[in-house]
């Protein structure tokens, strides 16, 4: 990311950046929480840029070593895979800074021990030794930026987080963590061990909210200039109004307007915005993005949102307000995005029992199994089910699954074991008896398929 891109992508996020930088300066751990595609990853990547570090840390920027870790790239969702990803990115950051050759070699030794240890007991020890060596072998405070932390925190053995807590307690002034998740860490803690890890973030949890109208308009203007896309002032005002400060909805809506103008081959007057508004509601990408936001909500939150849109008094909307889904103004409570509000209203029409078997309401993101609403799926679980559902009774091989669920860039990085674990989690939520599945079937040596009811 070059400096111009960093500046553009941080429009409206100046306070969020300053908050995290202040935590790093004070050696405090910090948790960033936000709904789907609100900008968590963009924020964490930007924090590792020297441009922002100099701006917020001044002369002490070299006193901090920010290491960005994309946990979507873990080779396997295990304690070993988690440690490998952290050490790999530490080595890359040390190499980019130059110097400190002896320290880099020490961490390299630890990395090799984690990757190829014959004795599993040596893996956490090698990881701890590497972290300690880096924190004590140079003056900069290590700030680990742990992006896409949800799956790792849910699946990795809780002892890994006990070790992270112990390292933090031991190296307090030299080490801190920043996590990015879709839900507060406390909502995902599984036991006392993970609870102690969560305690480190209790005082510094920041919800990433939708951008203000002014910031949304500035972001659209910057995007239009960067992509050389002609957007009028009226275009920008409309998009900011309907998308409501969600970065991906803003850009997607801008593309819809641009595409409509190109197809019409004539200048889009303001009187045609009614047609554009309908087109936005029906756009596949807009609907998918709204479905992701909808799926980020619990059933109770979804019901509260629908009640609010029906003009009913919602006594407890605290979590919706924290997430920025509901905004409070002098006129009362409202949904932050007209597009999401329209999507939510339509969910009332489809909340009915479906036929036997597995049925997906793609727009709502709801999954029904034998006429009953299934538990909320994670993003990866939902992507896998969508793929299988779209290929009902047909086999999906490993490559098709990786490409659809993780993306084509992960073809060589996701192994069979990780796919099997994802399938197992999906069965736990969908199958009446996960041990003897009747819907999500394994075709040995070939892949998986979803079958309809008998």
Image: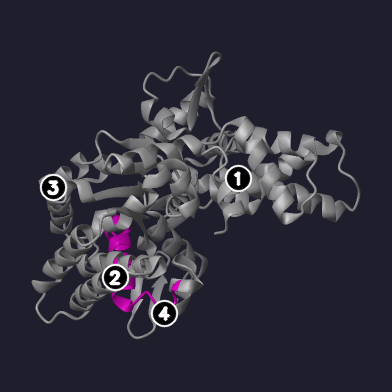
Classify mark 2: residues with Cα within 10 Å, few (<14), some (14-19) or many (20+).
Answer: many
Which label's residue is closer to the chain start, 2 or 4?
2
Q: Which mark is residue 318?
A: none
In x, y percent, where is residue 8? 60, 47
Q: CA distance from mark 2 to mark 1?
A: 32 Å
Residue at 20% x, 46% y is 173
Q: Is residue 167 left or right of residue 245?
A: left
Determine which quarter of the picture holds residue 447: bottom left
The answer to whether the residue labelled 2 contacts the one labelled 1, judged by CB atoms less than 8 Å apart, is no
* Residue under numbered circle 3: 169
Q: Which residues are magenta?
A: 410-431
Q: Nearer the viewer, residue 334 or 116?
A: 116
In x, y percent, where is residue 356? 40, 56
Which label's residue is closer to the chain start, 1 or 4?
1
* Residue under numbered circle 4: 412
Question: Does residue 274 appear in the picture of this structure?
Answer: no
Residue at 46% x, 54% y is 50
* Residue under numbered circle 1: 249
Q: CA distance from mark 1 to mark 4?
A: 31 Å
């Amino acid at each position: 990311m070059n400096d111009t891109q960093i500046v553009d992508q941080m429009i409206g996020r100046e306070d969020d950046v300053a908050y995290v930088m202040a935590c790093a300066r004070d050696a405090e751990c910090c948790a960033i929480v936000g709904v789907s595609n609100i900008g968590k990853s963009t924020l964490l990547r930007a924090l590792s840029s020297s441009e922002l570090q100099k701006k917020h840390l001044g002369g002490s920027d070299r006193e901090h070593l920010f290491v960005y870790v994309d946990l979507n790239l873990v080779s396997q969702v295990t304690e070993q895979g988690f440690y490998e990803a952290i050490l790999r990115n530490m080595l890359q950051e040390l190499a980019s800074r130059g110097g400190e050759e002896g320290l880099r070699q020490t961490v390299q030794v630890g990395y090799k021990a984690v990757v190829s240890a014959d004795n599993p007991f040596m893996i956490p020890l090698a990881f701890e030794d590497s972290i300690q060596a880096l924190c004590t072998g140079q003056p900069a405070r290590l700030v680990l930026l742990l992006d896409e932390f949800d799956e790792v925190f849910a699946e990795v053995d809780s002892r890994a987080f006990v070790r992270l807590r112990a390292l933090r307690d031991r190296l307090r002034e030299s080490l801190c963590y920043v996590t990015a998740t879709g839900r507060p860490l406390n909502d995902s803690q599984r036991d006392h061990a993970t609870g102690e890890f969560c305690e480190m973030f209790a005082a510094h949890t920041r919800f990433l909210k939708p951008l203000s109208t002014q910031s949304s308009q500035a972001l659209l203007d910057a995007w239009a200039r960067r992509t050389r896309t002609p957007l009028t002032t009226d275009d920008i005002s409309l998009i900011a109004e309907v998308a409501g400060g969600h970065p991906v909805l803003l850009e997607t809506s801008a593309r819809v307007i641009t595409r409509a103008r190109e197809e019409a081959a004539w200048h889009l007057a303001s009187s045609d915005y009614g047609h554009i508004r309908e087109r936005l509601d029906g756009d596949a990408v807009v609907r998918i993005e709204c479905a992701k936001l909808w799926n980020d909500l619990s059933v109770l939150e979804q019901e509260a949102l629908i009640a609010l849109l029906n003009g009913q008094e919602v006594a407890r909307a605290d979590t919706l307000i924290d997430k920025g889904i509901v905004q409070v103004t002098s006129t009362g409570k409202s949904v932050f995005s007209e597009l999401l509000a329209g999507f939510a209203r339509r969910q009332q029409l489809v909340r009915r029992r479906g036929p036997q078997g597995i049925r997906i309401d793609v727009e709502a993101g709801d999954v029904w199994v034998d006429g009953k609403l299934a538990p909320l799926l994670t993003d990866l679980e939902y992507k896998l089910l969508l793929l299988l559902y779209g290929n009902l009774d047909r086999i999906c091989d490993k490559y098709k699954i990786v490409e659809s669920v993780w993306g084509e860039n992960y073809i060589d990085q996701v192994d069979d074991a990780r796919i099997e674990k994802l399938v197992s989690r999906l069965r736990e939520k969908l199958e009446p008896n996960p041990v003897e599945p009747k819907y999500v079937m394994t075709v040995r040596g070939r892949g998986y398929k979803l079958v309809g009811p008998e």
